[in-house]
Image (cartoon, coloured by chain):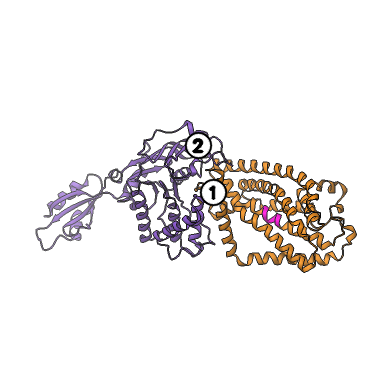
Amino acid sequence: MDRLTEGRTAAPAGIVVDRSDGAGDNVLARGREAPLEQSVPDRTDSVAVSVRGLVRRFGARTALAGVDLTIRPGDIHALLGPNGAGKTTLIRILSGLVDADDGEVAMSGAVGLVPSGDRTFYLRISGLENLIFFARLNGLRLRVARSRGLELLEQVGLAEAGRLAVGRYSHGMQKRLSVARALLVEPTVLLVDEATHDLDPEGAQRIRALVRDLAGRGAAVLWTTQRIEEIRDFADAVTFLRRGEVRFTGSVDELIARAPSRRFVIGVRNGRPDRPPSLRSLQGVLGSVATVDASPGGGDQFVLAPARDGALGTAIAALAEAGFEVTACRQEQAEIEEAFMALMTEETP
Amino acid sequence: MSAFAELAKLPAFMRRDLRIALSYRMGAATGLLAILGQAVVLSFLGKLVNPAQLPMYGGTRITYMEFVSIGIVFNMVVLLLLDQVATAIRTEQMAGTLEALLATPTAVSTIQAGSAAFELLYAPIRMIVFLVFIGLLFGLNLHPGGALPAVSVLIVFLPFLWGLGLLSAGAILTFRRGTGAVTIGAMLLGLASGAFFPLALFPPWLAEISKFNPLAITITALRETLIGGTGWASIASDVAELAPLSLLALAAGAAVFRLALKRERRLGTLGLY
């Protein structure tokens, strides 16, 4: 049975995989035969993944309501959103597991997938045998599959466990094996669905380093995560989904800028260089106007959180009146989590 | 991807399933013991059967043990294969590996065929081993010259079994349950196959219908070649009867399986169990 005609008829969504780079076949070409010629979206060579107006409904529920997404080669694009936002549905459509109801997707080259589930391997056989099996399904010959499997086991830190049955692996080890499987064919597009949620910090860091390396070699990465803070210094771009709609797309800095912090870092002196003001004395002056906390910078730096909008001036005036000298005041940078929460509560335009 | 490239993936499935089979060390041994146990029971029951009531093959009268040995071994192979073909995709669903498989550039039909390929090869080997065992234990008079004609009949019969398996696979994919229905269906076909007793014992109308049962046709052909020693001469009519039934079953099975798969993709529930 030919893959291009198997099991599907004309899907409304046009999904196109450009195989001109010779990187091999791709699951996304399977079965979406009708739209192949009619719906090639506009894209340039600098776009690895192009999603336009993607819609998917499950009965009365709309999982994706016209999602647009662009990922350039070499970029790690984080996909954030609360549970049920449509992140996994988007990944599943991109990886060819679910048909879209409408919209267009274009991707180039081989696609690697790190699924979110834990049980995605054959538990009775070894990690190496699992990798060999999946490598051969990706078209690698046995000898190449074996050497590639060994190489990737080494890279994800499973060299010693490679010959153990996967049933004896921890969740974290299975997740690392899952990443190794996704890298078997040196994908040009890597789809990662919560790769680090059950990993220890060292394991998570190792996975991020591997993915960063892959992106450095030109792969486009779509990275969904609930560990929001990990995208700082890792992701090049972020898309925030809520109820199937894109609520934000931009850089991590732009995301953070969406949530101006209500906390301020202030410098306070009391005229005694050898002994900076104590937290207790400052809080005693501020009362219920603001709360004050120690700053990670220490010394005469404090973090001030006004109790309400406009209370910053009242707080500084109170400190000055009590004899303290306020030497500096700047808004603290928001955490990504605060930006996430701000987008969560933002009304739909 | 070309059909050749898809075919080249089948050994990967066979290697995987061989490794998994080897990890269950008792599996093959218990299978052998079960069939030997069945053979022992039937050997005693066979003493009650008057050989005159049994059909003749190649002009020679046979014992009940010779009659039934082909039947029980063939029946076992049919049940094993049918179950394997019918539940290949379901097994991957249950194991959680289906989505990982579908994320590779592999056709679902390859996954389905690949998941049954090992059993397809292994079951006939087991069938021969079991027959040899039973033959040695109970002194069966099998004709080695009938082996190739017998294999030829089996090859023509396999698409029928595959089609039946695909029909069941489509139903299982849609309803998630239903392996019981597969087993009951296979049992009914087995009952009306003449595996354990001559079809002549059925009421005449049922015996007449059962003659068109592909299992009955195959078993009769196997007995003629392996026990009666009739060789190639006797299988032509059997193959002529079997071939259209096999093609019909395969076409119907493939159509139902495609429909079920299409529905699952549309609903987005292919990976769910």
Of residue A192 and residue A154, the one placed in the foreground of this image is A154
Q: CA distance from mark 1 to mark 2?
A: 18 Å
Of residue A6 and residue B229, the one placed in the foreground of this image is B229
Quadrant for the C terminus of chain A in the image: top left
Chain shown in purple? A
Q: How many marks?
A: 2
Expressed as whole percent of the image width and height from the top left, the position of residue B270 reads: 55, 46
**Residue found at the very far top of the displayed protein:** A38
Q: Is residue B123 left or right of residue A182?
A: right
Residue at point 55%, 40% (across, down): B266
Mark 1, residue position: B271
Chain shown in orange? B
Q: Examine the rendered structure and indicate whether residue A23 appears above or below residue B222.
A: above
Mark 2, residue position: A101
Residue B188, visible in the rendered structure: no
Quadrant for the N terminus of chain A in the image: top right
Chain on which label 2 sits: A
Expressed as whole percent of the image width and height from the top left, the position of residue A108 reads: 42, 41
Query: What are the residue bounds of the magenta stretch?
Result: B77-82
Q: Examine the rendered structure and indicate whether residue B195 appears above or below residue A22.
A: below
Q: Quadrant of residue A71?
A: top left
Chain on which label 1 sits: B
Can marks 1 and 2 be said to lie on one chain?
no
Q: Residues within 10 Å of mark 1 (few under 14, many from 20)?
A: many
Q: Quadrant of residue B48?
A: bottom right
Residue B201, visible in the rendered structure: yes
Of residue A189 and residue A186, the one placed in the foreground of this image is A186
Q: Residues within 10 Å of mark 2 (few under 14, many from 20)?
A: some
Question: Which element type, helix, strand or loop, lies under badge 1?
Answer: loop
